[in-house]
Amino acid sequence: MGYKITVSIPAFSRERGVNRTGGDASPVRNVARLDAEPESDDDFRNRMRDNLFAAVAVIVLMCIGVWLVDVMVDTQKAHGCYTPGERSCSLI
């Protein structure tokens, strides 16, 4: 009992727009210029401001989530107490 495994590799055609001799026929003009420019202080400040805003947003969302879970736990405790018919439930 022998099994024969065959593997076929599809033949890919050359990409259009790429010169294989070393040059790049990119549809974006002056793309090399973007790599050559150093980052300015303005870009750094904008990035830091955006990071700070994202951190504050995450902290606010986490606080809302903790508050929501706390309210849900209290509601579940009250529901568990009042369901059997008790009237004097003291929730701590």
Image: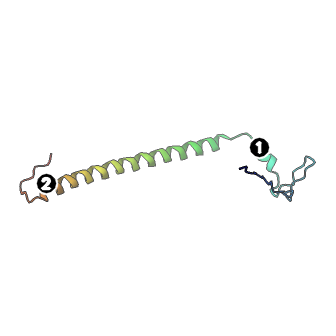
Left or right of residue 20: residue 84: left
Query: Mark 2: which amino acid?
Result: Cys
Q: Nearer the viewer, mark 2 or mark 1?
A: 2
Residue corresponding to mark 1: 35
In the picture as drawn, the residue positioned furthest to the front comes out as 1
At x 53% / y 44%, what residue is drawn? 51
Left or right of residue 45: residue 15: right
Query: Mark 1: which amino acid?
Result: Asp
The quadrant holding residue 15 is bottom right
Q: CA distance from mark 2 to mark 1?
A: 66 Å
User: What is the secondary structure assignment of the residue under circle 2?
Assistant: helix
Q: Which one is earlier in the sequence, the residue at label 2 or at label 1?
A: 1
Q: Nearer the viewer, residue 24 or 10?
A: 10
Q: Which mark is residue 81?
A: 2
> Residue 41: image x %, image y %?
64, 40
Q: Nearer the viewer, residue 47 or 66?
A: 66
> Residue 68: image x %, image y %?
31, 53
